[in-house]
Image: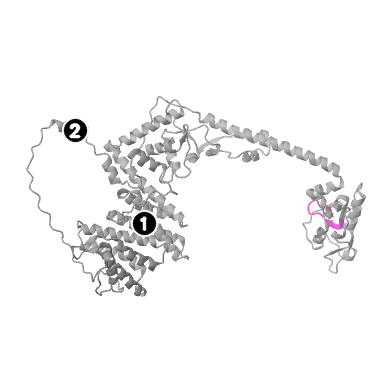
């Protein structure tokens, strides 16, 4: 862009457009009336300010009125686009030119500005053109909408032609594994309406599978031929080479007549697709027949030794998978991150161990206890990384699982199903329909007792054909030996109230963390002093386990030391007597004594040794 060296001779060439209204001409002359430049030659000085110019009631922006009647050309400067002499679009453009900006466009290279100015120069013609353009846009929109509707109809036509309804009434249901039969039964019971199966439509609050992988269960059933895709399945549940109409419109360069035809990729999203059972004369009859056959197969597995083994594996895996799902639910509830991919095998292994020996309600307890402990620690350490808290919860879950597997008398609390976290459809179908058992209370041992142990009919017939056995006189059983109770001294096991007062007095010399860790030592001490078959052994172990759970439950709501003291005082509620009368002591009092003794071994404050009278509550 060329410039003039003599700023004092700088002038604008204002050219009036032929036929322009005289009022617009007057406005344009005032708008472009340049008095000169400042001393530096970089800022224009105008004779009239913009707000001082009278528009004669026309309103609008003044530069549009000026453009409607004139062109203000700057001699020696050229448009950055068309390279013609620069006709200014407004006063600000002159300031840009004088500041040596090189990308200034002339007014004729600004079509939107010219369009706006046109309404002031020829308002009637402008109104006609605007009406024509509105009609053109309306027609184009209608044609676009019609083409889009045709495209959507074409998608449905392709689906109906590719996946027609084909019922095969003469064919039996294919042979399936116990898990496949259970997932199919759950679909028919919980995700089916009028013969159409849809997980997304019916299972919004809970998943189909206990592991949450509904798509995998559905894909397996489709691959094995039990389910087929329904022709009315949602269009967006299928895979298309061109996914949206807008993509097709772009590919056709905006020419509606050149739109490509829809084409399937034969991929689909099982969780949002619709299915039907093809075995029967129609969809609803097929569902009834399949439901009856699946229930028959699964319930008869209780009497088939080979299939009963498969059913037991299924029960254990369902309990474990529900436990993992609940563990992750509790993590999310406490705003903790999920277990990372590399740590997931540890979580699943711990849950699998529990699933083989414990009921689902107890697995829930273990998951709740582990995550609650991690959440409480996270609140005490707000700056610790959340991933570390999740790892701590996972380690706690693994430790609890190990202890619950080794000693089935510990941690026997059974949680109920959470109202805001319902069980999966497969779990409900397995326990309610097939086993007729409470899903939160039934364990694998109880399932084994329920089935798989009936005597074969051939063996029954053989037993009736054999002669009766001769009765043999059995010797009188030897009298059972009298139980030996270890001596318990009241001085070594003071009342829980006195223990609590002593812990308060010596609060600076013991740690709540050591107190929580002392439970492990207490369990070991009980096993050392009382034999496993001694009645006091299970009583004390249960009391110690219950108090440990009580401490875990209080930790999220109380300070650490307050939770310990509340747990010590709660021990007074466990009143089963330990030892021989008249020197028997309540179980809770004995457990607290063992806890304090375990602290003593770590160098903590000694238990109070003064002689005290037992309170009425400790009798």
Quadrant of image for the N terminus: bottom right
Q: Quadrant of residue 395 in the image? A: bottom left
Disc 1 to disc 2, C-alpha distance: 47 Å
Provide the residue designation for mark 1. Answer: 397
Provide the residue designation for mark 2. Answer: 460
Q: Which residues are magenta?
A: 73-85
Image location (x, y in percent) of residue 207: 44, 44
Would residue 196 appear left or right of 414 to someone viewing this image? right
Q: Residue at x 60, y 32 (%)?
A: 153
Image location (x, y in percent) of residue 46: 87, 62
SS of the residue under disc 2: helix
Q: Residue at x 10, y 53 (%)?
A: 479
Image depth: mark 1 or mark 2 in front: 2
Res 533 visible:
yes
Res 1 visible:
no
Image location (x, y in percent) of residue 98: 82, 62
SS of the residue under disc 1: helix
Q: Residue at x 86, y 53 (%)?
A: 66
């Amino acid at each position: 862009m060329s410039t003039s060296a003599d700023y004092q001779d700088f002038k604008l060439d204002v050219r009036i457009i032929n036929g322009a209204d005289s009022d617009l001409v007057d406005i344009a002359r005032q708008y472009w009336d340049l008095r000169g430049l400042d001393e530096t030659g970089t800022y224009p000085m105008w004779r009239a300010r913009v707000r001082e110019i009278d528009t004669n009631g026309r309103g609008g922006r003044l530069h549009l009125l000026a453009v409607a009647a004139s062109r203000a050309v700057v001699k020696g400067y050229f448009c950055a686009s068309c390279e013609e002499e620069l006709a200014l679009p407004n006063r600000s453009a002159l300031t840009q030119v004088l500041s040596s900006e090189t990308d200034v466009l002339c007014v004729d290279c600004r079509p939107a500005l010219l369009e706006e100015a046109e309404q002031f120069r020829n308002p009637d013609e402008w109104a006609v053109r605007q009406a024509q353009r509105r009609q053109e846009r309306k027609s184009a929109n209608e044609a676009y909408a019609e083409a889009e509707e045709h495209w959507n109809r074409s998608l449905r036509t392709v689906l109906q032609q590719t996946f027609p309804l084909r019922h095969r009434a003469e064919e039996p249901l294919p042979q399936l594994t116990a898990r496949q039969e259970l997932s199919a039964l759950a679909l028919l019971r919980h995700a089916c309406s009028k013969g159409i199966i849809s997980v997304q439509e019916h299972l919004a609050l809970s998943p189909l599978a206990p592991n949450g992988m509904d798509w995998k269960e559905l894909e397996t059933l489709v691959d094995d031929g039990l389910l087929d895709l329904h022709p009315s399945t949602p269009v967006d549940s299928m895979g298309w080479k061109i996914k949206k109409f807008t993509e097709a419109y772009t590919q056709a360069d905006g020419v509606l007549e050149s739109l490509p035809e829809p084409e399937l990729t034969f991929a689909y999203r099982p969780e949002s697709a619709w299915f039907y059972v093809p075995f029967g004369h129609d969809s609803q009859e097929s569902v009834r027949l399949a439901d009856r056959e699946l229930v028959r197969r699964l319930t008869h597995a209780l009497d088939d030794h080979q299939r009963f083994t498969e059913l037991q594996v299924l029960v254990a895996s369902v309990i474990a998978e529900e436990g993992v799902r609940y563990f992750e639910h509790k993590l999310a509830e406490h705003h903790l991150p999920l277990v990372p991919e590399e740590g997931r095998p540890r979580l699943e292994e711990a849950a699998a161990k529990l699933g083989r020996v414990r009921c689902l309600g107890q697995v829930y307890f273990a998951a709740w206890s582990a995550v609650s402990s991690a959440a409480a620690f996270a609140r005490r350490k707000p700056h610790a990384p959340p991933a570390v808290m999740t790892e701590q919860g996972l380690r706690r879950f693994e430790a609890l699982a190990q202890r619950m597997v080794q000693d089935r008398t510990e941690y026997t609390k059974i949680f109920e199903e959470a109202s805001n976290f319902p069980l999966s459809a497969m779990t409900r179908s397995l326990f309610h329909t097939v086993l007729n058992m409470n899903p939160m209370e039934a364990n694998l041992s109880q399932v084994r007792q329920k089935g798989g142990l009936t005597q074969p009919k051939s063996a029954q017939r053989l037993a009736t054909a054999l002669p009766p056995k001769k009765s043999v006189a059995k010797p009188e059983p030897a009298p059972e030996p009298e139980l030996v109770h270890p001596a318990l001294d009241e001085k070594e096991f003071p009342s829980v109230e006195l223990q609590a007062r002593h812990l308060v007095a010596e609060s600076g010399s013991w740690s709540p963390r050591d107190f929580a860790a002392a439970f492990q030592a207490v369990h070991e001490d009980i096993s050392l002093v009382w034999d496993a078959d001694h009645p006091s052994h299970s009583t004390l172990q249960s009391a110690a386990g219950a108090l440990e759970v009580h401490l875990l439950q209080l930790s999220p709501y109380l300070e650490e030391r307050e939770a310990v003291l509340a747990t010590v005082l709660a021990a007074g509620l466990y009143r089963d007597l330990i030892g021989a009368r008249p020197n028997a002591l309540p179980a809770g009092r004995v457990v607290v004594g063992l806890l304090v003794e375990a602290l003593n071994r770590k160098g903590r404050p000694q238990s109070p040794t003064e002689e005290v009278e037992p309170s009425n509550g400790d009798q």
